Image (tube, rainbow, N blue to C red):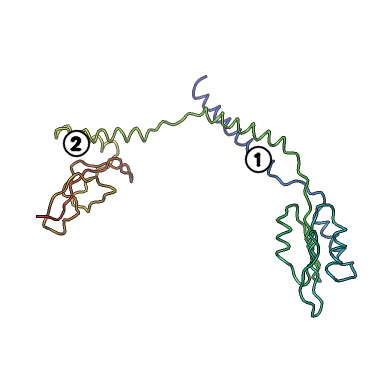
Amino acid sequence: MPRTRRNRIAAALVVTAALGTFCALAALLAPGTPTEDPEALAVAVLDTARRVTDPAAAAIAEQVGGALPAGARAVVVRPARANEPSSRGGTPHVAVVVGQTDQAAVSLLVSNGGVVGSHATADGWWTSVAVPASVRPPAGAALGLLVAAALLGAAAAELPRPRPVVVERDALVRGLADLAADLPDGPARAAEGLLVASGLRPLIPDGRLVDHLRHHVVGTEPTAEDDLVDTVAHTVRPGYADGGRIVVHPCVVVFVRGH
């Protein structure tokens, strides 16, 4: 099979396998189906709570607990009466709050999982319920995820890997720069012209402050002029940059304080 066609098939397999992996993972992570309609249950719980004649939190919690399906939990808020302090009571499955919504109770309700529904009335009653969700057997989705991941790995292995062109080019540039430094003037200028023609920018930092991250100091030259100290006296071998990236660091001699 021609290599180009083989690469196209491998790329198509990668896309297909990646899509299959995503779908299988989504199926595994999707929430289950609630055993009851949480919004309808919230309405029923609130009706039950309002029918309780005893306003005590314990009495309301007992009646609401009897109306909940197995595994469900609820928070009921009853408006406070005149001069009645805010309070909270109930059971592990039903929290009854007098006065205002207890955010801690609601947060606990949500963090325990399930599907949450809520209902409120204009006179200040409010309830929120968490209904357990039935989890679908994940075997099919897990198998699909495993197969899709295996196909993705196999298809990716068939894709062509780009050769390290930049690394090879940098090695050639460094080799030619080193060679030019040892050539006579004529051939050396020809080699330097070839490097420039290939898109490289020569770096000759004569007269500039030495930068030990960008310059390779190969010697020093004494000077009595303070302004020249730590500047480049002359460049022994030019450096070369590819855009903003230095490929070859210039070799320089630096002025130091002396006589």
Residue ranking furthest to the left: 259
Residue 59's image quarter? bottom right
Q: Nearer the viewer, residue 241 or 75?
A: 75
Other-residue count near label 1 (Cα within 10 Å), few / some / many at <14 / 14–19 / ≥20 = some
Residue ranking furthest to the bottom: 83
Q: Amino acid at mark 2?
A: Ala
In which quadrant is the C terminus drawn? bottom left
51 relative to 27, above or below = below
Q: Nearer the viewer, residue 31 or 221?
A: 221
Residue ranking furthest to the top: 1
Picture coordinates of residue 137 (x, y %)?
Answer: 75, 39
From the viewer's perspective, is 138 left or right of 224?
A: right
Q: Nearer the viewer, residue 10 or 259?
A: 259
Other-residue count near label 2 (Cα within 10 Å), few / some / many at <14 / 14–19 / ≥20 = some
123 relative to 127, above or below = below
From the viewer's perspective, is 64 left or right of 247?
A: right
Residue at figure coordinates x 77%, y 72% from the top left: 87
Mark sitting on residue 181: 2
Mark 1 and 2 residues: CB-CB less than 8 Å, in contact? no
Residue at figure coordinates x 83%, y 56% from the top left: 41
Picture coordinates of residue 209 (x, y %)?
Answer: 22, 54
Q: Amino acid at mark 1?
A: Leu
Residue matched to label 1: 25
From the viewer's perspective, is 136 left or right of 217?
A: right
Q: Sequence order check: which comes first, mark 1 or mark 2? A: 1
Mark sitting on residue 215: none
